[in-house]
Amino acid sequence: MTTSLRARAGTAGFLLPALVVVAVFYLVPNLLNFALAFTDWSAYKDTIAFTGLANFRELLQEGALSTGLRVTVIYAVVVMIAQNLAGLLLAFALEKPSRVHAFFRAMFFLPVLISPLAAGYVFKALLADDGPLNRAAGIEVSWLGSTTWTIVVVALVNAWKFMGVNMLVYIAGLNAIPGELLESARTDGASRWRTIRSIQLPLLAPAITFNFVTTLIGAFNTFDIVFAMTNGGPGDSTQVLNMFIQQQYAQGYYGYSISMGLLLLLLVCAVAFPLLLTLRRREVDA
Amino acid sequence: MRTIKYVALSVVAGLVIGVPLWMVLVNAAKPFAEARTPGFGLPHDWALVDNFRTVLTEGRAGVGLLNSLLITAGSVAFILIAGSMAAWVFGRSASRPVRLLFYASIVGILVPAPVITSVYLDAQLGLQGTRLSLIGLYAGVYLSLAIFLITGFVRSVPRELEEAAQLEGAGRLRIFATIVFPLLGPVLFAAGIVLWVFIWNDFFYAFFLLSGESRQTLPLGLFAVVSSNSHSTNWNYVFADVIVVSLPLVLVFVLGQRRILAGVMAGGIKG
């Protein structure tokens, strides 16, 4: 009896440091979202009062919600496609281990190490109207001044910055495919394309799941790159949800800002969990 | 065929990686007037040393470096140690409550920390603006990933060694410190790298949680350099600072490239 009690106390002791920190600094702020989003907490009042759905009504009426959602979803979809496509192409090109491949892997992984804020500033300079790219190519493309296309440009910079991670995960997935499978496909006379489509892509399912889910969640929560490149502009055409949250917070409308934060939280949950489950189920079937 | 592939890869890498890199390097070496509209040409007058000196003194990059080191090392060390301790229990116990706690502690992989309510919480705790509040937030979010990766690894480690030590009367803490923890080397290395890169480069959370110049991290310093001139951006200083912010990680990467890529890949498969 005493030994089992002591064992249990020992177990609790090992769990405690991690669980306390997760509870205090992660779970509590997430739960506070559900309370403070319904208040008028701001820099202009000494007290915090419950205001029901007022913040959400304002989000709807001001159009902030529809703009934020539209921009964020476009951004996330472009990032998810571009980043995974780039990662997959690079993985197929650099799949086999060799010195040359190791060099190129390292090159394409380099942007992962750069702070996203720094990457944003670099491309802001590169793509400016009178910037080096336009001058060197002799073109006049307003990369960062279009209310339609700039969101796509910024999303592509996001894909540039993180494609190295997707590449590595796909390479790991490709290397985990048993050599005999590819060998027997070759003896059966299967073309390269056929091998990719019928053997490699289906067996990459776990890597695809991982990459799609992480890329999508990362893109929903984007801030640094957009903040550096466009600060939400031109107009509000690159106003992703976190940009809105930051701007309202900076103006002192804390409760209002948190109500958008709560919607972002719900959006991530609504997309991430079903996607994870669907992709996992397909993995098992395959 | 192979030659064509290598030429194609070189062209792509040159355009996609080489061009931005070149722009940063040459413009970080130009004096202010020349870098006003950044270009691809080499500098007429070289001001690389001057620019670095300005960034280090006026841009407070030295303070930024210290704070980034302190905050990143503190967070990663805590996450790996506390994460391993918890992961050992999670990996060895099949009981229902423990499994529920496991799921509760890995939610952070999918759902990020909300930033404004963290500021509110830190004010209540008397931590507002401090480095400790930021370390707490990083630990709170990223313990999820560490626990997930390490637990998977613990499950693949045989129990025999631990049981033998237990029979010889070793306590749990001793078994953990002398037997389990050293065995976790590969996964701690992989998780440590990923966490280090996340935390070192983070601007978003630091921007909200830290206050005061003396506490600013390298990315906050970069933002300060960009915002310092309200009329036009001092691109020469900005690019010099981009180098300062990026160089530590890039240097470590170049030195340990092979192990780092292999480590990150191993982590990816588990996920």
Image (spheres, rainbow, N blue to C red):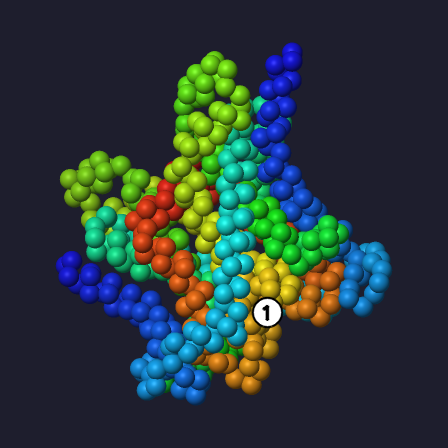
| Residue at image coords 34%, 86% | B45
Q: Position of residue A257 (x, y in %)?
A: 70, 62
Note whether residue B113 is visible.
Answer: no
Q: Where's residue B159, x and y in %?
A: 44, 21
Q: Quadrant of residue B5?
A: bottom left
Q: Residue at x 56, y 78 (%)?
A: B228
Q: Chain of mark 1?
A: A
**Quick check: A252 left or right of A202?**
right
Quadrant placement of the N terminus of chain B: bottom left
Q: At numbered mark 1, what does the secondary structure look like: helix, strand or loop?
A: loop
* Image coordinates for residue A34, horizontal then vertical, percent: 73, 50
Q: Is residue B69 above or below residue B82?
A: below
Residue depicted at x 31% and y 54% = B255
* Location of residue B37 (image quadrant): bottom left
Comparing B37 with B251, the one in front is: B251
Q: In this orientation, which residue lies closer to the viewer: B46 or A30? A: B46
> Which residue position is annotated with label 1?
A239
Going by the numbered disc 1, the residue's amino acid type is: Gln
| Up/down of A238 relative to B253, above or below | below
- At which x and y percent is residue A147? 54, 77
